[in-house]
């Protein structure tokens, strides 16, 4: 695991409205959030299952956050004594934890550095987060970067325990995630693709655009779009992101 960075104190910009708490937080629209959570349902389930296992041994006050790779909050969990605090806070699924949305925070810092980071209360720009000691880190399932994990506490004396807990969660999640994938692969009937469809599916997974695929295969863009439509129908999806996610779980890419 990469070395943990203890963030240096953030110097506020006089033009930063987030620091003053005047700017609204950014949220993903509900329809988009529902689709995003559907795509990441394995990840969310693995997160919640892992937290439920770890919480049995916790005595402190903790807040657990899971975001996707763009910093959108997918799921959260917290100790029972935080229920009122969280319900009266702006934190809810769909919230963007980028610096542009809610000021500098542990997740935004680890998004920039791609390394685990500890952020102290006074280093958060938004006053909503200035009671929290936070540890955040990139989250991987195998070699795939899937999002970010944040574990926070309001007790300064628990910083060491916070980091230890945060290091345990990804291992639990990895096991749960892989078990779900294996179970779905066994239960889900195989999808039959032509050789050309598989080639295009792999190119989509590689991030190629329709135009790039057409040029590479020396076919028309409308032909590529036709193949994409057939692929989407076979997988029961409506977007390239969903197609790649499901095809990956079914070991097609």
Image: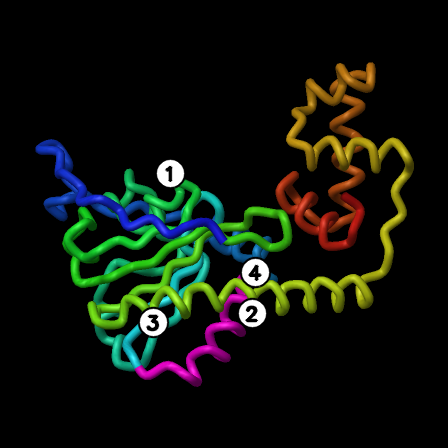
Residue positioned 89% across, 47% down in the render: 192
Q: Which of marks 3 and 4 is in front?
A: 3
Tell me whether circle 4 and circle 2 mark residues in contact (CB < 8 Å): no
Q: Where is residue 33 in the image (x, y as percent from the top left)?
A: 47, 52
Q: Which of 95 and 34 is in front in this view?
A: 95
Identify the residue position indicated by label 4 in the image. 43
Residue 75 as seen in the image, left or right of residue 104? right
Tell me whether circle 3 and circle 4 mark residues in contact (CB < 8 Å): no
Identify the residue position indicated by label 3 in the image. 161
Q: Where is residue 146 in the image (x, y as percent from the top left)?
A: 54, 50
Marked residue nearer the N-terminal end (4 or 2): 4
The correct choice, above or below, for 189 with respect to 146 in the image is below
How far is disc 2 from disc 3 in space, using C-alphas? 17 Å
Total numbered labels placed on residues in the image: 4
How far is disc 1 from disc 2 in space, using C-alphas? 25 Å
Q: Nearer the viewer, mark 4 or mark 1?
A: 1
Badge 2, how many Cα within 10 Å: few under 14, some, many 20+?
Answer: some
Marked residue nearer the N-terminal end (1 or 3): 1
The correct choice, above or below, for 13 with respect to 218 in the image is below
Local secondary structure at mark 4 = helix
Instruction: Write down the region rendered in magenta.
Output: 43-59
Badge 4, how many Cα within 10 Å: few under 14, some, many 20+?
Answer: many
The correct choice, above or below, for 106 with respect to 231 in the image is below
Q: Nearer the viewer, mark 1 or mark 3?
A: 3
Answer with the quarter of the image where residue 63 lies.
bottom left
Marked residue nearer the N-terminal end (2 or 3): 3
Marked residue nearer the N-terminal end (1 or 2): 1
Residue positioned 86% across, 56% down in the render: 190
Identify the residue position indicated by label 1 in the image. 112
Residue 51 as seen in the image, left or right of residue 245? left
- Would you say residue 126 sits in the magenta stretch? no
């Amino acid at each position: 695991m990469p070395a943990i960075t203890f963030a240096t104190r953030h110097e506020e910009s006089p033009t930063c409205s987030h620091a003053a708490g005047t700017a609204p937080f950014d949220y993903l629209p509900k329809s988009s959030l529902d689709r995003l959570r559907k795509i990441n349902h394995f990840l969310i389930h693995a997160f919640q299952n892992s937290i439920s296992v770890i919480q049995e041994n916790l005595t402190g006050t903790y807040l657990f956050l899971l975001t996707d790779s763009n910093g959108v909050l997918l799921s959260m969990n917290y100790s029972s004594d935080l229920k009122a605090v969280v319900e009266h806070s702006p934190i809810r699924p769909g919230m963007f934890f980028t610096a542009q949305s809610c000021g500098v925070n542990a997740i935004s810092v680890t998004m920039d550095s791609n390394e685990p980071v500890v952020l102290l209360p006074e280093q958060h720009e938004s006053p909503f987060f200035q009671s929290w000691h936070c540890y955040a880190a990139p989250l991987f399932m195998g070699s795939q970067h899937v999002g970010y994990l944040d574990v926070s506490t309001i007790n300064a004396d628990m910083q060491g325990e916070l980091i230890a807990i945060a290091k345990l969660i990804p291992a639990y999640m990895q096991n749960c995630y892989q078990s779900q994938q294996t179970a779905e692969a066994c239960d889900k009937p195989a999808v039959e693709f032509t050789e050309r469809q598989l080639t295009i599916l792999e190119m989509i997974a590689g991030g190629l655009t329709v135009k790039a695929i057409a040029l590479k295969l020396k076919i028309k863009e409308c032909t590529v779009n036709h193949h994409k439509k057939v692929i989407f129908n076979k997988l029961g999806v409506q977007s390239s992101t969903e197609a790649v996610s499901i095809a990956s779980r079914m070991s097609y890419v």
